[in-house]
Amino acid sequence: MKKIILALFVLISGLSYGQTSSGDLRHVVIFKFKETSSKASVDSVVKSFMGLAKKIPVIKSMEWGLNDSPENFHQGFTHCFVITFSNKKDRDEVYQKHPAHMEFQKVLGPHMEKVFVVDYKAEN
């Protein structure tokens, strides 16, 4: 687990140079999909998740990528998403309760084997 957290730190440490700023709240979500889920199904989940950025105004930025680490510590987690909010209130009271987020969870549910989530305040 310590190696996963270290890898996450390295992955997200470069984000402070984008549209975001120190003090922003990062919401890192990493999925492990079921082996029975087709590539088309997983692609649909990704498209649905990324679509939240246009539906939920408090999302400052959102990006995703596939695991590409040569260290083989991924434990089957393949898809990493980083969402940036201005503060906890935006994450907790708007994003988490937003109907579009709730609908996304229904799309994700049948395909998700595990999820790993880390939230942190950006520091420079």
Image (cartoon, grey):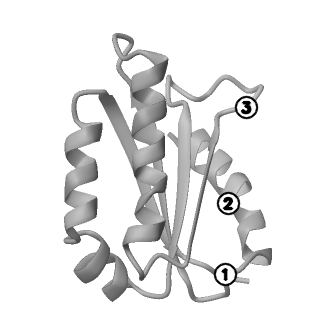
Q: Are marks 2 and 1 in contact (CB under 8 Å)?
A: no
Q: Is residue 110 left or right of residue 37?
A: left
Mark sitting on residue 57: none
Q: Using the image, determine if residue 18 lies above or below residue 115.
A: below
Label 1 sits on residue: 20
Count residues near mark 1 (Cα–Cα under 10 Å), then give few for <14, some for 14-19, many for 20+.
some
- At which x and y percent is residue 60? 54, 79
Instruction: Tell me the kind of residue under disc 2.
Output: Ile
Please tell me which of labels 2 and 1 falls first in the chain: 2
Counting from the top left corner in percent of width and height, residue 58 is at 42, 82
Residue at left offset 57%, top offset 29%: 74
Q: Are marks 2 and 3 in contact (CB under 8 Å)?
A: no
- Disc 3 residue type (three-letter): Asp
The CA distance from mark 2 to mark 3 is 14 Å
Could you say whether the residue bearing mark 3 is in a helix, strand or loop?
Answer: loop
**Residue that appears at 23% across and 71% down:** 98
State the residue in front, 8 or 110. Answer: 110
Mark 3–mark 1 Cα distance, whole angstroms, equals 24 Å
Q: Is residue 16 above or below residue 66?
A: below
Q: Which residue is at a point 23% across and 82% down the rendered structure image?
A: 93
Return the x and y of residue 81 as percentages of the image width and height. Answer: 53, 52
Earlier in the chain: of badge 3 and badge 1, it is: 1
Mark 2 lies on residue: 12
Give the answer, above or below, for where 5 lies relative to 92.
Answer: above
> In screen coordinates, is 90 left or right of 118?
left
Task: Provide the secondary structure element on which disc 2 rests.
Answer: helix
Quarter of the figure with the C terminus: bottom right
Which numbered marker is on residue 68? Answer: 3
